[in-house]
Amino acid sequence: MRQFTGQRAWLVQRLSALLLLCATAALGAFLLIEGPPGYPAWRAFARHPAGSTLILAVTAALCLHGWVGARDVVLDYLHRPAWRLFVLAAIAGALGLVFLRVLVVLAATLANAP
Amino acid sequence: MAARPEAPAGRRNPAGLPRFLDLSAIRFPVGAIASIGHRLSGACLVLAMPWLPDMLARSLRSQDDYDVLLGTWRSPWMAPLEFLILWAFCYHVLAGLRHLLMDVGVGAGLRAARTSARIVLGLGFAVALVLLVARRLP
């Protein structure tokens, strides 16, 4: 967990924020111009290597960004070491699971027949 | 923060620091509200994240699952939850953008920061409301 504290956490928070900001702007522009994609186009996007990579990158940024923010909040408001450890472990586990499950969903989408 | 009365001697935490949590006696300038809102919206979004993989799976499984998922989110019963998530997302992004701009020195002065805090608080709420209504138009 050392990699995710101090100055490196600050940097991870900013870099993931920039990626998520770009993704939000791109998604917002797309929805404004094209409207909701509809199932066939959405599935085709998720099956395209670039599309699935983008979804995975956004998920990774989301999990990392969520981790740094949640960690900051826990350290500010929870002071008992045992509670900190328990809550931080729960958050790390939950966010890690989110990433793994998205990975599984994308793999299943790629593996299924078109 | 406003001048605070001395904390009673009996209410000190293990570190020996006075504990003072009379929220009604602490002043909250607009910058503090913007900052707390950023944390609150971030906490909402983290709490919502465990549902994302399931929604992604359902959106990709079949046309029927996709339609059911979107239909669920159009139901009037979901509107309050949808508004909360939309507000948390919009406000968090705007407050984060304000934060990043301050990091590079844009609008970091007190006067500009207070103005941008007000703008971001208002805009976050307004954009969330517009999105909620726009999504429900035929």
Image (tube, coloured by chain):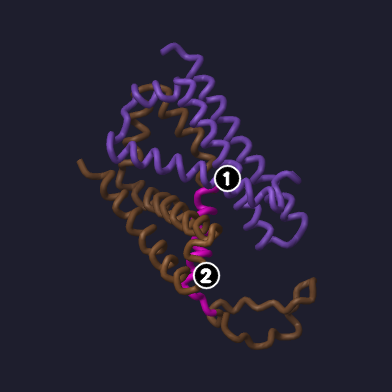
Magenta stretch? B27-46
**Which is the main secondary structure of the residues drawn in magenta?**
helix
Label 1 SS: helix
Visible residue check, residue B76: yes
User: Left of B135 or right of it: where is B31?
Assistant: right
The numbered disc on residue B32 is 2
Q: Residue at x 43, y 28 (%)?
A: B58
Q: Which residue is drawn at 64% across and 46% down?
A: A91
Pointer 1: what residue? A15
> Mark 2 — on which chain does it sit?
B
Q: Chain A is drawn in which colour?
A: purple
Query: In this rendering, is residue B13 above or below A24?
Result: below
Q: Residue at x 76, y 46 (%)?
A: A2
Q: Which residue is drawn at 38% across and 22% down?
A: B62
Check if mark 1 and mark 2 are on a common chain.
no
User: Left of A61 or right of it: where is B69?
Assistant: left
Q: In which quarter of the image is residue B121?
A: bottom left
